[in-house]
Amino acid sequence: MRCAVVGHVEWVEFARVPHWPQAGEIVHATDVFSEPAGGGAVVARQLARLSGRCELFTALGDDELGRASTRRLAELSLDVHVQHPGISMSTRRAWTHIDHKGERTITVLGEKLLARGPLPLEGYDLVYFVSGDAAALHSARKAKFVAATLREQPTLREAGVTLDLVVGSLNDPGEQYDGSLDAKLVVLTDGPNGGTANGERFDSVEPPGRVVDTYGAGDSFGAALAFALARGDSLPDALALGSRAGAAVITGRGPYTAQL
């Protein structure tokens, strides 16, 4: 399977805290670490785990965090194609607090940098569109199978291309679906309750260990689901693989240590 992702990357500082701080409260982190993450990076890494390699088309600032992100993503078996949008644009950063239950709370710092088309995506078996401009999505449609996240609905509507799969959340206000897309399959996740596929319920699976960090669960689910469908799996089998991937990632520290 030749896979590619069009999506954003941000440099994320993770801090494990006993609980989310209340107004005016000081909490002490017990574990602090940094990774290039964000939806594009997490989806691409999960696809690389499943297919052996994955190409990531993204945009980063021409700065030290951008260079550090590129080096680290290459270590994660990603072939990274980076656009630099301008000398004044910095790599976006984020703070993620992980509480004692493993729940993540994210504060984003800076503007999302988007890959812009046209992009050389003809002939790919799967392209997963996480973020980018409409021209980039038109390039993605040259692939045999195109998946997208509902986080970017304005861009999906602007591009107006047929999507084989869109993935969103029943619980995230930014991923609610209004039915306006030309999508063959719409999958909406519902955390431990599973979710729906074109309105039909499906079940989740139990994590294979203790929940450590929920960062990346939805993106890992979507990546594995798209991979399975693109290679020809049945919908029930693809949903099962996606659910296993979403359950696996939350048992590890950060988004990459326990991906399926």
Image (spheres, rainbow, N blue to C red):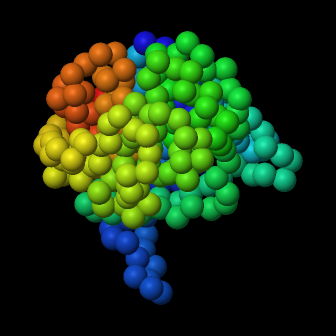
Quick one: 182 or 77, which is closer to the camera? 182
Q: Find residue 252 and report its image quarter.
A: top left
- Name which residue lies at 84% across and 53% down: 88
Instruction: Name above or below for residue 152 compared with residue 115.
Output: below
Q: Is residue 117 left or right of residue 31?
A: right
- Name which residue lies at 50% across and 26% down: 127
- Name which residue lies at 19% across and 25% down: 237
**Residue 235 horizontal/vertical position (percent):** 22, 28
Instruction: Name above or below for residue 191 compared with residue 140.
Output: below
- In this view, the residue farthest toward the right is 87
**Residue 231 horizontal/vertical position (percent):** 34, 16
Instruction: Name above or below for residue 183 compared with residue 105.
Output: above
Q: Is residue 124 left or right of residue 169?
A: right
Quick one: 195 or 37, which is closer to the camera? 195
Evaluate whether residue 71 shows in this view. Answer: no
**Residue 203 horizontal/vertical position (percent):** 13, 43
**Residue 107 horizontal/vertical position (percent):** 52, 64
